[in-house]
Amino acid sequence: MIIILKQGITPEEKNNVRSVLKENGFIVKEIKGEQDTVLGAVGTSRIDPRMIEIMPGVSSVVPISKPYKLASRELKKDDTIVSVGKVKIGGNRIAVIAGPCAVESCDQILRIAEKVREAGAVILRGGAYKPRTSPYSFQGLGEEGLKLLRKAGDEFEMPVTTEVVSPRDVEVMKGYIDMFQIGARNMQNFELLKEVGKTGMPVLLKRGLSATIEEWLMAAEYLMASGTDQVVLCERGIRTYEKATRNTLDCSAIPVVQKLTHLPVIGDPSHATGIRDMVSPMALALVAGGASGIMVEVHDHPELALSDGPQSLYPEQFERLMRDIEALAPVVGKAVEKMPRLVPATIKDKTAENDGDASHTIAFQGERGAFSELAVRRVFSEDEKVLPCKEFKDVFDAVASGKAIYGVVPIENTLGGTVFDNYDLLKMEENITVVGEVQVRIIHNLIVNPGVSLSDIKKVYSHPQGLAQCREFLDRELPDAERIPFFDTAGAVSYLKEIGAKDAAAIAGSPAAVYNGMEILKQGIETNVRNYTRFFVISREENALMFKSRAHINRAAVTFSVQDRPGSLFQVLDILQKHGLNMKKLESRPILGKPWEYSFFVETELSDEKDLENIIPMLKENTTSFRVLGTYTAAH
């Protein structure tokens, strides 16, 4: 029953009502709504509701018609938000749980944890105990797997979840994990549900293989009646006559369940489909259907996985899925749950000194903590020193003069377009070649001096592109704040720190905040989440082979000019087409000192470096100037 309390009820009157209910064998839950406070009372006792209704402080008593009482929307109108560590599941959030089906080794779980964390997952999954159909299949590493999962979670600052299969393991597991997972086979293992419920910890409850929605909610009721109110429901497909997929994903269950219960519901497209290529489309279907999150399996070598390799996404597939979810989220009125970005430890030090040793120095444009420095750390180890440069030309000069062995410069942004200055510098510096490429997602944050609140902000500093890319946030949250262009995003943060501004904020990446000891007030404030910058790694010719030996070369960048006559550009492009070189980019640039004449910049795919070498003589015959700017491995 639901006991609606009067707004003026005293603490003593409330305690009296609670005591009478407990004396009659009821489990009592207090729920505070926007307007009313109610007591939910469930149990097997038969008590006349009128006995409670006439008590002081009670407004009315309403019976709960559903067999699942605590989980019912009748008991609680507002959505329950489940807290798993720092992560929230429910409401207008979309939380993504990812990781391998099974923890196989320390190296494996650490590798995958890093990749899913960077892509945007907020909870790490990994099986330590594996209930398998065959007794001869891999059953998991047990407690050792729990230790490894916990280590990965701690290292990458993610809460962890794993499946519990036996009541006797509950006590051991609760010391390692942040959320229990009840698998489909154990949904109606009532002794297990009771034991897990007693812990009071968050629980992810998967729908049984052939369970009705009511049976699923009754399993949740077991957990809640035993002591936890932090339950997340997970639709993972049900068994039907269809054999084309592992199970049949019941997307329609999402809106149905949301009407019946206040508990959040997520989906597991990996187990539903059992086929890697179907996981991403079904994940998006779940989000479109209103799910509060998804749980997917990710493995960097699924062909070697000890469990469920065929349904595990490659890390690059998972990264693309996360971007698609971020694009879809606003359509369904939700936002993707995010964790604070991990920042390399070396962002605080390792600035190159004037010691004459350039062998471990990487140059970039901007101040410490700039997105360019983040790009450096994506490519080079933390042992390498960095050399911040004021201008792009300074990066090229540092590499050309030997002050730095490599440089990292932006070449293109998905929103801002091409960085033409660096194309021109590449063409001018004949001893500089492109040896690599890296992509960085640009995540803007509102950064302030410690103690500054949103209401204090009267000015916002950032690079003009940073201000433009966060226009919707600024219009909505800081419409009256003056927007002041600055030469560099990270430089804006340094400037605010230097002047100690208490009425201003900067828009920049999280590394700039960490390096300067500033506070991130709002994360991910960019309007378009598909904001990436592509960077070139440059070096002198003599150092190129040392870098390019890291991976297979599959891309080339060339520049050329042609005669001013009809079809001259077509002849060059036709050579590429006839020899199977897929052109990825074409840009034109004015030729200095020759008004209205242009040179061209082309990037093309290669299956082998010899693909380009074999046609260079033909390309030179059809151009007035031709130069290979570099061959490298394209970023994914």
Image: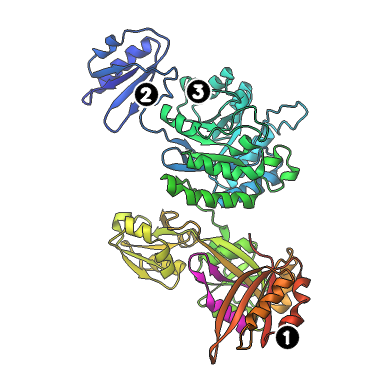
Q: Which residue position holds label 1?
A: 621
SS under mark 3: helix
Quick check: 357 left or right of 75?
right
- Amino acid carrying mark 2 in the image: Leu
Point out residue 194 in the picture as x, y percentages from the top left corner.
53, 19
SS under mark 2: loop
Q: Quadrant of the C terminus?
A: bottom right
Q: Magenta span covers which residues?
A: 407-428
Q: 459 above or below 107?
A: below
Residue at (48% x, 38% y) in the render: 291
SS under mark 1: helix
Residue at (31% x, 60% y) in the render: 457
- Amino acid carrying mark 1 in the image: Glu
Point out residue 322 in the picture as x, y percentages from the top left corner.
55, 49
Quadrant housing residue 465: bottom left
Front in this rendered view, residue 342 or 438: 438
Distance (Cα) linking label 2 and label 1: 80 Å
Packing grade of label 1 (10 A; few <14, some 14-19, many >=20) is few
Packing grade of label 2 (10 A; few <14, some 14-19, many >=20) is many
